[in-house]
């Protein structure tokens, strides 16, 4: 499923069903985000989780003139919890970057690349110049459908009256190779 925004899903299925659908997606990717789509940015910010960050706070007394020049600054180090990426950081995501959320895995911060940079680029280009028949072999298309029984026929009534025997079904097979 590919969406431009969460609101697109909510408008079709409603908020509760949209939440259920998103909850059942084992892989969610953010390939790009519009600057005004704060709902999507907030969703990814909350799904990315939090991280422990070491912070240093420096303070000095500026109430008495010139005193701060002779006293040491008060430094406090602490560990705080912050979102892995804030909503604002997601909204300012570089167009060449993407985020992938995979089931049972940590989030992935990915760099997009063009297909010409892939190791298989020469093979892809070669396949693009071949006729479709050479790249994808033709295959037969066969389906089996049951014959429609005539309920009013005497034969069917006799078969149905026998309690331990199921009526025989006849199948006809069609194929694209038949002429």
Image (cartoon, rainbow, N blue to C red):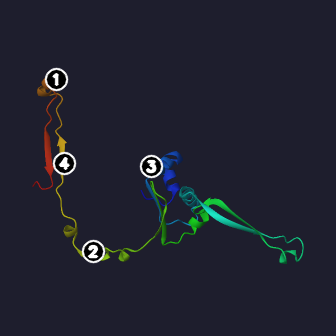
In front of the other: label 2 or label 4? 2
- Spatial CA span between label 2 and label 1: 61 Å
x, y percent for residue 128 = 27, 73
Q: Mark 2 points at which residue?
A: 123
Indicate which disc, 2 or 3, sits on the residue closer to the N terminus: 3
Q: Mark 1 points at which residue?
A: 164
Indicate which disc, 4 or 1, sits on the residue closer to the N terminus: 4
Which residue is painted at 62% across and 60% down in the image?
Answer: 82
x, y percent for residue 51 = 59, 60
Residue 24: which disc? 3
User: Horizontally, is 128 left or right of 139 in the view?
Assistant: right
- Spatial CA span between label 1 and label 3: 45 Å
Which residue is painted at 12% across and 25% down in the image?
Answer: 154
Secondary structure under tag 3 reads: loop
x, y percent for residue 107 = 49, 60
- Spatial CA span between label 3 and label 4: 32 Å
Quarter of the picture containing the C terminus is: bottom left
Q: Residue furthest left?
A: 179
Indicate which disc, 3 or 4, sits on the residue closer to the N terminus: 3
Q: Nearer the viewer, residue 79 or 85?
A: 79
Residue 143: which disc? 4
- Spatial CA span between label 4 and label 1: 30 Å
Neighbour tally class for label 2: few under 14, some 14-19, many 20 plus, Cα within 10 Å: few
- Spatial CA span between label 2 and label 3: 35 Å
| Proximity of marks 2 and 3: CB atoms separated by less than 8 Å | no
In front of the other: label 3 or label 4? 3
| Proximity of marks 3 and 4: CB atoms separated by less than 8 Å | no
User: Horizontally, is 147 left or right of 19 in the view?
Assistant: left
Which residue is painted at 15% across and 22% down in the image?
Answer: 162
Residue 23 versus residue 112 in the image, above or below: above
Residue 34 versus residue 156 in the image, above or below: below
């Amino acid at each position: 499923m590919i969406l431009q925004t969460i609101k697109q899903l909510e408008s079709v299925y409603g908020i509760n069903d949209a939440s259920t659908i998103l909850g059942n997606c084992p892989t969610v990717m953010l390939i790009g985000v519009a600057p005004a789509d704060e709902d999507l940015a907030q969703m990814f910010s909350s799904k990315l989780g939090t991280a422990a960050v070491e912070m240093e706070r420096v303070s000095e007394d500026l109430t008495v003139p010139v005193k701060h020049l002779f006293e040491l600054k008060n430094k406090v180090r602490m560990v705080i919890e912050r979102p892995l990426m804030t909503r604002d950081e997601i909204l300012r995501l570089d167009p060449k970057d993407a985020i992938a959320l995979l089931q049972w895995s940590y989030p992935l911060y990915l760099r997009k690349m063009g297909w010409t940079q892939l190791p298989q680029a020469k093979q892809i280009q070669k396949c693009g110049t071949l006729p479709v028949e050479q790249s994808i072999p033709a295959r037969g298309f066969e389906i089996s459908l049951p014959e429609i029984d005539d309920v009013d026929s005497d034969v069917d009534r006799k078969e149905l009256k026998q309690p331990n025997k199921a009526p025989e079904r006849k199948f006809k097979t069609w194929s694209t190779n038949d002429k």
